[in-house]
Amino acid sequence: MAQYELAQLNIALMKGPIDSALMADFVANLDRINALAEASAGYRWRLKTDDGNATALRPFGDEMLVNLSVWRDVQALRDFVFGPEHLAIMQQRRQWFEKMPQAYMVLWWVPAGLAPTVEDAKAALDHLRAHGPTPRAFTFRAAFPPPHAAAKQAAEQAAERFVDECPAG
């Protein structure tokens, strides 16, 4: 079993109230897309209310929707996000959501089996916004391996350097 899993947060600024005609197509697709995510290989957990979605949760403000989930790894999340059904909905996002002036999506590693809190997610997004992609908070374009993999890779590189060095110089 992996020591770490991938957490992801994305937020979106709605162009209108969630119950408005403007948001109706988005809302109509929520259950289907959420079910698709939950059936995806590598899906682990997502933040949701008893209703099964997170639209009632507004930790970033009244007009801001939040999506917080955990996946096996970056590839599992990438496969879902860029899969045809999810991608088709997200290609319509400008109908429902304002363009964000700063980072609105962040990825970070959490210990396996741990569901991150909204506070953890806010901290990761704040870190990304302040420092850019780092092993602590990153994006699809600048992804980092889980901590145990990074440590293993560093140890392997150090071992290779040691073997390549000739003590007789």
Image (spheres, rainbow, N blue to C red):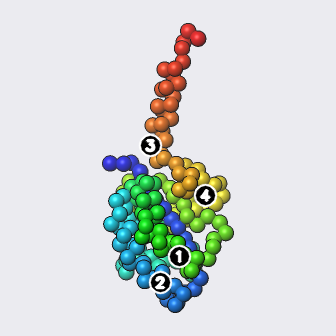
Report which quarter residue 32 is drawn in. bottom left
Mark 3 residue type: His
Quarter occupied by residue 49: bottom left
Tell me which label, 2 or 4, sits earlier in the chain. 2
Q: Amino acid at mark 4?
A: Leu
Q: Are marks 1 and 2 in contact (CB under 8 Å)?
A: yes
Q: Residues within 10 Å of mark 1 (few under 14, many from 20)?
A: few
Q: How many angstroms separate mark 3 from mark 4 (CA)?
A: 21 Å
Give the residue displayed 48% in from the left and 36% down from the top: 153
Question: Residue 160 — which label?
Answer: none
Which label lies toward us, 2 or 4? 2
Of circles 1 and 3, the one toward us is: 1
In front of the other: 110 or 34: 34
Q: Tell me how far mark 1 sits from mark 3, CA to CA.
A: 38 Å
As drawn, the label of residue 128 is 4
Q: Is residue 33 above or below residue 149?
A: below
The residue at which mark 2 appears reads as 25
Q: Alpha-carbon distance for marks 1 and 4?
A: 26 Å
Q: Which residue is pictured at 55% across the width and 64% down the height? A: 105
> Is residue 146 shown to the viewer in this render?
yes
Mark 2 touches mark 4? (CB < 8 Å) = no
Say which residue label 1 marks: 92
Label 3: which residue?
148
Comes first in the chain, label 3 or label 4: 4
The residues bearing labels 2 and 3 have C-alpha atoms spaced at a distance of: 42 Å
User: Label 1 is placed on what type of residue?
Assistant: Gln
